[in-house]
Amino acid sequence: MAGLDFRAAPVQVRVPATSANLGPGFDACGLALTLADTVVARVSGGGLDVEVSGEGADSVPTTERHLVVRAMRTAFDVLGGQPRGLAVRCANHIPHGRGLGSSAAAIVAGILAARELVVGGHDHLDDLAVLRLAAATEGHPDNVAACLLGGYTVAWTAADGVHALRRDVDPSVVPVAFVPPTRVPTSRARRLLPTSVPFADAALSAGRAALLTAALTAPADRELLLAATEDRLHQQYRAAAMPGSAGLVARLRSEGVAAVVSGAGPTVLALTDAAGAAGLAAAAPPGFATMVLGVDADGARVVAG
């Protein structure tokens, strides 16, 4: 398109998995995890060529409906025009439909790849604009904020749009994910939420969400993680859709482990230390995969281009 120059070289973007909510921080708090997808994109002479390997290779569309491509198209529109053609390669490691931010990762990857492919793209789409565009595409800011910024994030929406705050996580915190074999679509999980909750439950969750930042970021306060991850806003209402996950959360918490449903589920995330992580491998119910992860401090980044 006249007036818009595209780079000839391909760009490669790495985007981490994320866990949102972390118990009481519904649609606000997020944690970036050391599990990542990689997208390589380049401008071609015409058409669309999409290849997917890893997670979702046999199920996601390789057309304009692919989420990375949709995010790229949205970003190109903001930047001023579409390229003649696109070639996109996705190497996926984040499980789909499990509450680990696979859709947020795809959206962030697409927007960052599109920005990088446009000469002067950063001048027209700065980092705050990327956050807001990704949140608008995803529908909520918690996962995309953590994916973009890394570490622990709190996102909120003000009159002028979405904002996010990032903090480093205490290095002794070790996230352990228990990933079930079945999926629960986010749309279904959201339909289970009530239109109102008891005032006492809302007050408790607000206090626990405020405590969460200290418990995750200050080494002296890590022992508060069990209390800080208590939730009465959403997990109890979603339990019927993921009874195995709800049962695992209840069992781990009764044993003193700070366990929550990751995002909309059904993955369960436990926040522990290295010794605790070593002892949790046997805690997974049949069919669940255990993944001992770390906190991704870097967030999404262009690693080649």
Image (tube, rainbow, N blue to C red):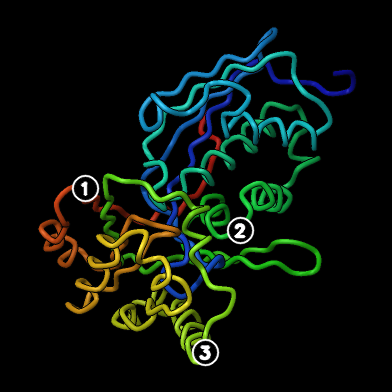
Q: CA distance from mark 3 to mark 2?
A: 22 Å
Give the answer, above or below, for where 278 lies relative to 49.
Answer: below
Q: Local crowd at mark 3 within 10 Å, few (<14), some, or many (≥20)?
A: few
Residue at x 44% of width, y 53% of height: 18
- Report the front residue among 124 and 238: 238
Image quarter in which the C terminus is found: top right
Residue under the point 53% across and 34% down: 13
- Residue 301 is drawn in which quadrant? top right
Nearer the observer: mark 3 or 2; the answer is 3
Give the mark nearest the N terminus, 1 or 2: 2
10 Å crowding of disc 1: few (<14), some (14-19), many (20+): some
Marks 1 and 2, Cα distance to the nearest angstrom? Answer: 27 Å
Q: Residue tagged by mark 1?
A: 289
Which residue sits furthest right? 2
Front residue (pair 223, 25): 25
Element assignment for label 1: strand
| Coordinates of residue 103 in the picture (x, y in percent) | 52, 43
Q: Amino acid at mark 3?
A: Ala
Residue identifier under label 2: 141
Q: Give left or right: position of 41 versus 259.
A: right
Residue occupying the point 54% across, 90% down? 199
User: Image quarter for residue 276?
Assistant: bottom left
Residue 203 numbered tag: 3
Which of the pair 152/102 is nearer the observer? 102
- Three-letter amino acid code at disc 1? Ala
